[in-house]
Each structure stands twice: as C-alpha cells, then as structure tokens.
Image (cartoon, rainbow, N blue to C red):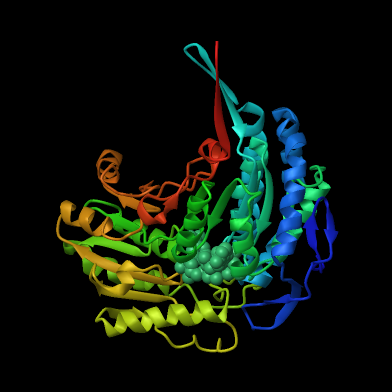
Amino acid sequence: MKPHDAMFIDGGWRPAAGAEAIEVRNPADGQVIATVPAGTAQDVDDAVRAARAALPGWSATPPAERAARLAALRDRMAARIGEIAETVTAELGAPLTFSTRVHAGSPVAVAGSYAELAASYAFEEKLGTSTVLLEPVGVVGAITPWNYPLHQIVAKVAPALAAGCTVVLKPAENTPLVAQLFAECVAAAGIPAGVFNLVTGLGPVAGQALAEHDGVDLVSFTGSTAVGKKIGAIAGAAIKRVALELGGKSANVILPGADLARAVKTNVANVMANSGQTCSAWTRMLVHADRYDEAVARAAEAIAAYVPGDPTDETTRLGPLVSAAQRDRVRGYIERGVAEGARLVAGGPEAPEGREQGYYVRPTLFADVTPDMTIAQEEIFGPVLSVLRYEDEDDAVRIANGTVYGLAGGVWAADEETAVAFARRLETGQVDINGGKFNLLAPFGGYKQSGVGRELGPHGLAEYLQTKSLQF
Ligand code: NAP
Ligand code: MG
C-alpha cells in the first residue's frame, strides 16, 4: 500500500486542511518509511459533518443490509491479510508471524463476528406493556492507540456500524498506515460515503478536537489512563456517552497444586507477545512461597527463548518497541526496579547485543518484587515480568487486587472449581482459567481505573445503542 497524503472523508480521499505532516518510522531501525498528513480541527470538523450527514441514512438501513456491508468489509480485509501484517510489522515492529496471526487475523474475525451480530441482534425487546427500541447513539468519535492498531480500530468501528452509528476515527500517530489501509477496505466494501471517516493527526490536536466536537455523541477511547481522564472529563462536561479502555497491571495467580511448568511458560509468552505492549498482559506473576524459587527458575529458562530480532524474520519472537520514547520509558522502569531493590534475573536496561539501532529492550525478569514497588504498581508496557511471592490465598487476593487497575488476569489451580472460586474474588474484567484462550465474543474492559464500558461481542455492540421505550 502507498500512503495517502490525504484524509478519508465522505467516501473519498481529500487533501488535509493544513500542511503539517507526521513521519512514520520503522521501529527496527528508526528510519522514516512514510509521512501522512497531521489533521487539524478543520479536518475533524469536515469529517464530523460528513458523519452527521450520513447518519440518517445508515441508521435507517435495515440491520441485515448493515450486516452484509460488514461481511464485505471482513472479506476485503481477509483478501489483504498479508499486506495488513506487513504494514503493522513495518510501523509497530511486531514479528511478522505475530502480525499475521494476531494483528491481521483478529480484526478479520472481529469484523466477521459483527457481521453475524448485526444480522441476529435483537434491536427491539418487549417489557410488560412496552416495546423497547435499541437505537444507534449517533456519531462516534473513535481515538485509538498503536499497540494493536487494527484490532482496536475494528473493535470500535465494527460494532458502531453494526449498531447503525457513523464514525470518525483518529488513529495513533505511530501507526496511521494500517488505518489508511482499513479505510481502503471500507471504501471497497460498499459502505456508504460518510459512514466511516479517517483523520490522521496528533492526539492533543486532532484527537482533542474530535473529543470536544459538539457533533460527536459518543467518544470511544483506548490508550493511557492519563489521556483517558482528560477524555472522560471532556465527555462528562458535555453529557456525551464515553467508553474508556485504559491500562492494566494484571496478575496471573498460580495456586498451589497448579501445573506450574505450563502456568509459568504461558505467563512468559503472554508478556513477551507484542514486546509487552499489551494492555491485558499478565505483568505480575504471583506464586506461593513454597514453589517460588522453582517458578523463578522456570521463568528464567522460558525467557531465554525470546531473543530480540528483526521482525520481518519469520523466526523472530521478540521485536522492538514502537518508538524511542516507549523504549526509553521501559528502560527507565527497569532502572527503577533495580533501584527499589528488585532482583534482576534476566535482561536489564542496556540495549540488547547487536540491537543498538532500533527501539529494542532486553526481555527482563524481576524476582523478589514486593507489591509496593513501582514496577508492581505502574503499567510498564514493555517485555518486563515481575514475580511476586504470596503466603496464602487471602494474601494472593490482596496482592492481585492491590493496584488501581483491573483489566485482565489468570488463575491456575489443580481443578477448575478452585480456580473459579478464586477468580470470583478478583477485581478485574477478564480472567483466564487454567490457560483459557482469548474469546473474541467475551466482553473486554476494565474494573476500577482500567476503564469504563466493554468492547467485543454483544456487550460491545450494546455500547453503541441507546434505548427508547414505547408504551401500549
Ligand atoms: P496515549 O497518548 O493515551 O494515546 C492513545 C491515543 O490518544 C492516540 O491516538 C493519541 O494520539 C491520542 N491522544 C493523545 N493525547 C490526546 C488528547 N489530549 N486528546 C485526545 N486524544 C489524545 O498513549 P501513548 O502515548 O501512545 O502511550 C503511553 C502509555 O499509555 C503506554 O506506555 C501505555 O502504558 C499506555 N497505553 C495503553 C494502551 C491500552 O491499550 N490500554 C494503549 C496504548 C498505550 P497520539 O498517537 O498522537 O499520541
Ligand atoms: Mg501519546
């Protein structure tokens, strides 16, 4: 795909209002690979007007027809899966095998799930003497991050379109190319002009203008807690609907009697995937004191298999981080962990050998981490795993719940019943039981400061609906 020097507004590519541009860099070597226009408030206004104008037509389109357009979108994306993977690898740095399976595969599946849901969802319900109509909220302003760039776009756009909403998207400045590719797929899928619009740009400029725009009825944001607080305040002041998918510091709790080898290996893979840039990553591994040393030794062995490498090489399992800023931030946290007295078992703040050019960080394992340490409290967003010790179940619950976050988690036990009983005590939005797999129909979202609202599946669709009741 060639980058567009334009915005996708009202069904076509139009020149940006201003002349500013964003440079897109390849994280593996820091070289500029493309530029895209940096949108202004004027571009956002044009896009919101287009979305408002398209709203009456799209919201009145029968759900079966919206479903057909979403199925066509899924098919357009599926036909370009290799190109999607290469684009994400080029601008994010994720290993190509991971880009193909997850960054490209998951959005295709999610788009497909909403093609099915649009056709089958009950947009009307009976309640006593009332008929309740579930109607689209209106124009959606979607602001997305770079870590799962296409997944996070589709997790907002597909349910919004299924619900009958229209959308203006402001993707992350680091990963605008896959967003442009997505806009090409939208156009090719025969989705009417103005239903989906793309404004590339900087967060504090285009993102903020979108969140503040009077013509936006719902702001859906995924990203940092710091920006999420601002978006929430803007939306609250204007009485707009808001969905916030923020950070996490998820705990993986290995209970006595669990399959320790499998639990530890799975935990290491979970944190190393996408170079640790996953909001739901199990960055805290909690192990009973009796098996603590064994768990640390197993984790050290597992982490050795993650050698930072060229993301376009099919054997690479760990690529660079997205940007120099992110690399420096993560290295800062590693230094902080050492300074606060955690035991560095593997990795460290230095550049990995032979990888001084790109935005690489050494896969890092900390032991003897206590719950009060910064690395046990704050989201690092890098390939860094902390192992914490607990004395009994109550202690494990206290530690697991002892952060401001609550997005995901894992529980491993000898049997499902024990694991589920423990999972009920966790203040978090998702828990994988004994290595349960990611389910794209399961509601995804946070307790506490991990966010407001849910994405994916029918719960994700409900976010984009408002209710009207008719009494008979
Ligand atoms: P971020 O600044 O919160 O970025 C998320 C999105 O919000 C981007 O599109 C960004 O634009 C936009 N944005 C930034 N400031 C804005 C504003 N004032 N108004 C409206 N939109 C705004 O996140 P980041 O800087 O990329 O990453 C920082 C940290 O956030 C990471 O280290 C990680 O801990 C966390 N994070 C979490 C998630 C998650 O999935 N929960 C995802 C990404 C990051 P720009 O691209 O121009 O900044
Ligand atoms: Mg930012």
Q: Nearer the viewer, residue 197 or 25?
A: 197
Q: Position of residue 253 (x, y in %)?
A: 29, 55
Q: Where is residue 343 in the image (x, y as percent from the top left)?
A: 27, 80
30 to the left or right of 223: right
Residue at image location 48% in from the left, 60% down from the top: 228
307 to the left or right of 334: right
Q: Where is residue 97 in the image (x, y as percent from the top left)?
A: 62, 63
- When the figure is inspected, residue 134 is found, relative to residue 392, above or below; the finding is above
- When the figure is inspected, residue 111 is found, relative to residue 176, above or below; the finding is above
Check the picture and name the quadrant holding the N terminus: bottom right
Q: Nearer the viewer, residue 307 or 450?
A: 450
- When the figure is inspected, residue 321 is found, relative to residue 185, above or below; the finding is below
Q: Can residue 90 be seen in this view?
A: yes
Q: Which of 175 and 468 is in front in this view?
A: 468
Figure disc tally: 0
395 to the left or right of 330: left
Q: Where is residue 109 in the image (x, y as percent from the top left)?
A: 63, 45
Q: Nearer the viewer, residue 431 or 269?
A: 431
Residue at image location 40% in from the left, 67% down from the top: 379
Q: Quadrant of residue 472?
A: top right
Q: Can residue 275 be seen in this view?
A: no
Residue at image location 63% in from the left, 38% down from the top: 114
